[in-house]
Amino acid sequence: MIVEPARTEDTADISRLLAAYLSTTEQEKAEHGLATGGPLPQRYQDEIDHPQELLAQTLVARKASGERPSGVVVLKTDADQVEIKRLWVDPAERGTGAGRALLQAAQQQAGPRRIVLTVWDWRAAPIALYRSLGFVETPSWDDRERLLCLTFQSSR
């Protein structure tokens, strides 16, 4: 698995991956009584429609050099922390190590800065992956019901 910064030619695939992630998330939220299940909120649709605006903050996973991205992680970097905003691996590519590789690349890129993320409590597989890489649950900074807040602090 290769993880590298997103390139301009990846924008269509980033859009595809983000659309799958955001649509799935909204569907799951509706199934858990946390959303109505209508169209995507505009802020999410904007990410799908304008993925080029996220390129500088995005890493992609590929099975091999030159292949289309099978996974994506979008980061928001501040002076003291890095937030994982989106992490998604195409369902057909799950089990290949793409999610782990993307998270490890994000950890490496963060260096000594703290990494923060939120995840819905019903997403058992991602939660297990986060915990296996040293993320721990912390008091919530987000008031949305059923949303877990996790952090990772490098020992570097």
Image: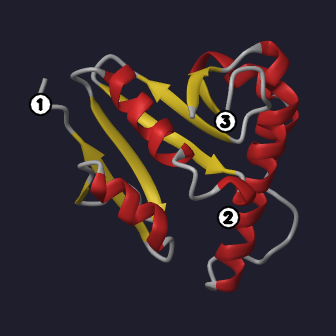
Task: Pick the residue in front: 116 or 94.
Answer: 94
Sequence order check: which comes first, mark 1 or mark 2?
Answer: 2
**Horizontal arrangement in the rendering, residue 94 relative to residue 75 (left or right):** right
Where 48 falls versus 141 (above or below)? above
| x and y percentages locating residue 150 in the rendered image | 31, 54
**Horizontal arrangement in the rendering, residue 110 relative to residue 100 (left or right):** left
**Which label lies toward us, 2 or 3?**
3
Task: Pick the residue in front: 69 or 146.
Answer: 69
- Marking on residue 133: none
Q: Quadrant of residue 49?
A: top right
Tell me which residue sits at (35%, 42%) in the image.
116
**Which label lies toward us, 1 or 2?**
1
- Disc 2 crowd rating (10 Å Cα; few below 14, some 14-19, many 20+) is some
The amino acid type found where label 1 is placed reads Ser
Tell me which residue sits at (34%, 24%) in the image.
108
| x and y percentages locating residue 68 in the rendered image | 79, 31
Question: Element at badge 2?
Answer: helix
Residue that mark 1 sits on: 155
Residue sticking out furthest to the left: 155
The amino acid type found where label 3 is placed reads Lys
Marks 2 and 3, Cα distance to the nearest angstrom? 25 Å
Tell me which residue sits at (67%, 20%) in the image.
6
Question: Element at badge 1?
Answer: loop
Residue that mark 3 sits on: 63
- Pointers 2 and 3 in contact (CB under 8 A)? no
| x and y percentages locating residue 90 in the rendered image | 72, 52
Task: Pick the residue in front: 136 or 67.
Answer: 67
- Disc 3 crowd rating (10 Å Cα; few below 14, some 14-19, many 20+) is some
The amino acid type found where label 2 is placed reads Thr
Residue that mark 2 sits on: 25
